[in-house]
Image (cartoon, rainbow, N blue to C red):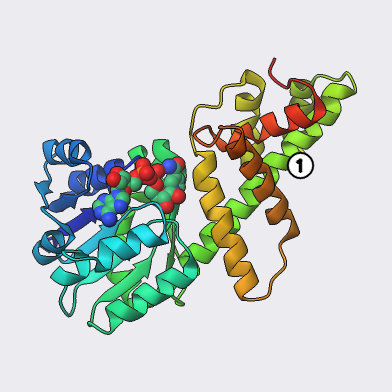
Amino acid sequence: MAKYKVGFVGLGIMGKPMAKNVLKAGYGVVAFDFNQKAVDEVVAAGAERGESGKDVAEKTQVVVTMLPNSPNVEAALFADNGIAAGLSKGKAVIDMSSIAPKASQSFAKRLGEMGVEFLDAPVSGGEPKAIDGTIAIMVGGPQKTFDEYKPLLETMGGDVNLVDTVYGAGNITKLANQMIVAINIAAISEAYSLAKKAGVDPESVYKAIRTGLAGSVVMDQKSNKIFSGNFEPGFRVELHIKDLQNALDTAHDINVSTPFTAEAMEILQSLKTYGHEKEDHSAIAEYYENINNLKLQK
Ligand code: NAD
């Protein structure tokens, strides 16, 4: 069966390798970003240059968006010369950005009124997995739309799940993921601080507990960054602040109390106050170093 053409809007840390994987799988890609250097790179890999969101949507069957937050997706879709201006009945938009679930629902409704299908499909795994094509993709939207575009999503991800047929379910899942990760990094940093002040080597504590009940992927991936004091991102503090803000807003909208998320948010905010917003979120350990006057770095 001939493959349809795919539009790609948003070619940042994640979008660029994801678009390249779609190309590698044999789909035609039309790409657009404000950053022309990023577009040049994807064009060099075989994509066609899009002149605007509208141009991308006119030339393709489905448009993938990979943008920072809800207002960016709204602008990419609905601003002058945006994607919506080039869409028509039967086409689709798959938004893979991590945004507020309420925004996903609003975009699904507005596009649905035009006869355009929608999925929210945020991802987890970071740049290395985006390059490998093994990111986890968590999807919300109709089963039929998911079935239609699952092969496309599988060119970018190793684990593609329709979480629920409710729009926004993908982003609710992503917020849950981000809450758990932030709280975990804080718990690890807090426990290592206790060990350090007690005169017990935190790295030895890590090695002793990593295969027990407290062990986790977060513990394995972040402990070495904490002990090396290397907070190169990875996943930036400022992006995690964005996600926890969306988590808190969503929770408060539907009357859910999330005290640990609020605490983790304040720790990240304090890091930003001290100019650490471009560092990896494992820099949460630096907050604990400061309030406890100690160093976890070896
Ligand atoms: P990024 O800041 O590197 O890239 C965003 C890109 O969008 C930029 O190139 C920017 O020029 C472009 N852009 C913004 N508005 C635009 C518009 N209206 N039209 C066209 N282009 C526009 O961000 P990223 O790290 O690629 O993250 C994208 C999304 O994926 C975010 O929601 C993020 O939270 C999520 N995410 C990131 C990671 C990670 O490790 N970086 C991991 C999982 C999920």
Q: Position of residue 138 (x, y in %)?
A: 45, 60
Q: Nearer the viewer, residue 121 or 3?
A: 121
The answer to whether any part of residue 184 appears in the image is yes
Q: Nearer the viewer, residue 276 or 19?
A: 276
Q: Is residue 18 above or below residue 172?
A: above
Q: Position of residue 275 (x, y in %)?
A: 56, 32
Q: Position of residue 84 (x, y in %)?
A: 21, 70
Quadrant of the rendering where the C terminus is positioned: top right
Give the SS element for disc 1: loop
Q: Give me the residue at 27% from left, 42% from top.
A: 16
Q: Is residue 282 left or right of residue 161?
A: right
Q: Nearer the viewer, residue 42 or 147?
A: 42
Q: Outermost residue, bottom direction?
A: 113
Q: Position of residue 198 (x, y in %)?
A: 90, 23
**Residue under numbered circle 1:** 214
Q: Outermost residue, right direction?
A: 198
Q: Quadrant of residue 213?
A: top right
Type of amino acid under label 1: Ala
Q: Give me the residue at 15% from left, 76% from top.
A: 88
